[in-house]
Amino acid sequence: MPADHLGRREFLRRVAGTGAATCVGLAAGSLLTVPGGAQEAPQPAPAPPPAAPTPPPPPGARYFGPKTAAGEIPCLLCPRGCKIKPGARGECQAYLHATDGTLQSLSYGKVAKWMVEPVETDHFFHVLPGAPAFFFGAPTCNLNCSYCSEWKLSQFPVEQVPNQPADPKALVAQAQAAGVKLLGSTYTDPAASLEYALDIASAAREAGLYPIAHTGGYLMPGPMRDLASALVALNIDLKAYSDANYKTLCRGSLQPALDAIKAARDTRVWLEITYLVVPGYNDSPSLIKDMCRWIVENCGPATPVHFVGFFPRYKHRQLQTPSTDPQTLKSFRETAYEAGLLFAYVGNLPGDTGECTLCPHCHAFLLRRVGTSVSAVDFDALRGFCTKCFTAIPGVWH
């Protein structure tokens, strides 16, 4: 799941006392400055319109194989490879082998959380800088991250998670009413409600919006290509760079996660990668070096990588895992540059230059970030190039 830590949005609220719901109504898609310290705390966007009085049955899943001899339905969505018995659910609790013999998506058409915030709060630094995005998340997740900040939404069955009904077009209408250009799936993970995420992305494009998503990326290559192809921009959380740590932190495996990232890279989607640095679990300098080299070789040197500071949440409060040392984040950023990455960032360090976008050629400041404030310096935000040396900067700028 993407919202697997004290994220940038929550951290910035605490240190700056500011929110981003005030961005609603600003010119979507434009570069803007959101001053910190003076705004009210963010409020949830208006609830999506209610569903029809008699809602249809849950829609069928799209990623499954033929029934086994034992009558199980193999789910082909993610690497867990669940074989779901009649009346049972997959590990993510989002797919049910119904009494009529079909596999149904229980989270389709349900929204557990939504809010309008600057796109940077979800670690998109090369996508319409400073623009507000309508972010939403459906119930449940297919990973079990031990530090999840949204565990009340992600780690329970759908019926135990408070939610509002919203079909794809209704959700798009809410985003349009908020006056935004970006519609983003986050908080939990689109992987556990992929059919819903795909239909929302399709409806968003039809309405002239830009669909984006932040995901844990724990999908089979085919479904991941489908998701990435439907989006304008995608941020994938890489949880660790060793199989043992992947299992410990989120009950997943490393190689399927890497395969999913490569599948996304094979599409035209704009890709950024986030790495939450958990002290004592995934902060080995040698593994970080290997990971950065892998990203350069498999995703390209222009792929932005975000090293995000960890704060203990969920099970790690009891484990008393310490917060990430800021110097560790800065060190890993330098490691990324040494490995050949052109854009490396630190997260949860407001005011640090590691949150700013620099020109990889002349090192001029292009985009300066301080908390929730984003401003262009030596950057043409419409055409996407450095105004000092005229180097083209990859991203989604208009």
Image (cartoon, rainbow, N blue to C red):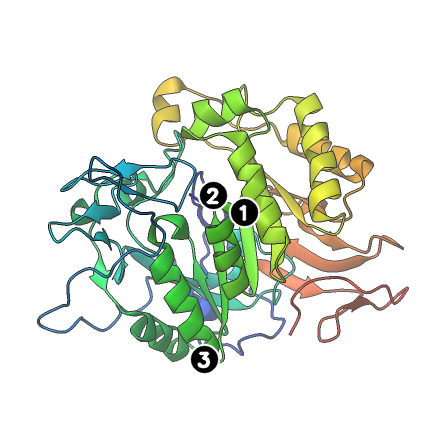
User: What crowding class fits label 3: few (fewer than 14 Cα within 10 Å), some (14-19), or many (20 or more)?
Assistant: few
From what the image shows, is residue 309 above or below residue 23?
above
Residue 320 horizontal/vertical position (percent): 41, 19
Mark nearer the N terminus (1 vs 3): 3
Mark nearer the N terminus (3 vs 2): 3
Alpha carbons under labels 3 and 2: distance apart: 26 Å
Does the rendering let one see residue 313?
A: yes
Where is residue 170, by image quadrant?
bottom left
Mark nearer the N terminus (2 vs 1): 2
Q: Amino acid at mark 1?
A: Ile
Q: Which residue position is annotated with label 1?
A: 236
Which residue shows up at 40% across the image and 78% down it?
Answer: 176
Secondary structure type for disc 1: strand
Secondary structure type for disc 2: loop
The single residue placed furthest to the front in the displayed view is 69
Image quarter in which the C terminus is found: bottom right
Residue 299 horizontal/vertical position (percent): 69, 47
Q: Which residue position is annotated with label 3?
A: 206
Whether residues under marks 2 and 1 lie with C-beta atoms below 8 angstroms apart, the answer is yes
Residue 8: assigned label: none
In front here: 24 or 58? 58
Left of 139 or right of it: where is 124?
right
Q: Amino acid at mark 2?
A: Gly
Q: Which residue position is annotated with label 2?
A: 216
Whether residues under marks 1 and 3 lie with C-beta atoms below 8 angstroms apart, the answer is no
Q: Amino acid at mark 3?
A: Glu
From what the image shows, is residue 34 above or below residue 162?
below
From what the image shows, is residue 284 above or below residue 355?
above
Residue 117 horizontal/vertical position (percent): 46, 62
Residue 229 horizontal/vertical position (percent): 54, 62
Alpha carbons under labels 1 and 3: distance apart: 25 Å
Which residue shows up at 72% across the image and 54% down it?
Answer: 357
